[in-house]
Amino acid sequence: GENVEQHPSTLSVQEGDSAVIKCTYSDSASNYFPWYKQELGKRPQLIIDIRSNVGEKKDQRIAVTLNKTAKHFSLHITETQPEDSAVYFCAASRREGGYNKLIFGAGTRLAVHP
Amino acid sequence: EAGVAQSPRYKIIEKRQSVAFWCNPISGHATLYWYQQILGQGPKLLIQFQNNGVVDDSQLPKDRFSAERLKGVDSTLKIQPAKLEDSAVYLCASSLEVEGNYGYTFGSGTRLTVV
């Protein structure tokens, strides 16, 4: 089955700097890669996702890149702000029988210091 | 759009007791998932429903966990008997599963503490 590894486990940056979180996956058939943000005590919320037919997707200060050959994808946050502090989870899945089954990484705790 | 509703928000039980969690997905979302999130870890899939049928329950500890989704709408997850290691947040999620829209929407979760 799919296995997703995520690093670093913790990341501390100064406000305004960029943050990069990387994930690798094992199943070459995986074709959908979302990123979730989870603030303390709250539910995970989808912030961006990418499908395997594109290499990069951007939404304002957030971007995701995908390297299918190397089986890794990354989340890039530019001009970080204190409200970006949270735990970020990557996930991978493939459509099988019409369904997704998301397998999550262990998470990265991002701290943005003013 | 109303979100995914879960109850209760918190539950404390003694080991060997039983507990049940309830989830009501977003209206129209045919696919429903239960995830277990242990502190400091990513969510782990327990069971996946499509309407009222089970799609995947390979990670569900069936000797103590059970889940159902009668009528293909809301769902319950039960643990009987509970163990200390079951302490976690139990997240319910639903998705629309149509072309171009595969994102999950999570509920707020039920935080279970087994003492």
Image (cartoon, helix red, strand yellow):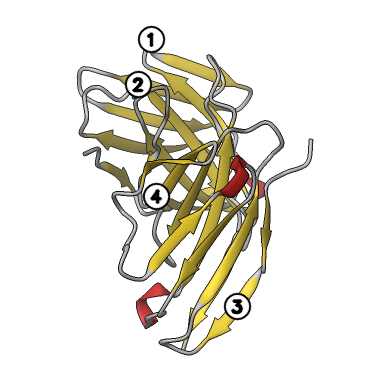
Q: Nearer the viewer, residue A107 or A16?
A: A107
Residue B11's tag is 3
Circle 1 residue: A53
Q: Residues within 10 Å of mark 4 (few under 14, many from 20)?
A: many
Q: Position of residue A111 (x, y in %)?
A: 53, 54
Mark in front: 4 vs 2: 4
Whole-angstrom CA distance, mark 3 to mark 2, is 37 Å
The Cα atoms of the two marked residues, 1 and 2, are separated by 8 Å
Chain of the residue under the numbered disc 3 shown in the image: B
Horizontally, residue A79 falls left or right of residue A76, namely right
Eyeballing the image, is A91 above or below A98? Answer: below
Q: Amino acid at mark 2?
A: Asn
In this rendering, do the residues under marks 4 and 1 share a single chain?
no
- The chain to which mark 1 is attached is A
- Residue B45: mark in rendering: 4
Foreground: B83 or A61? B83
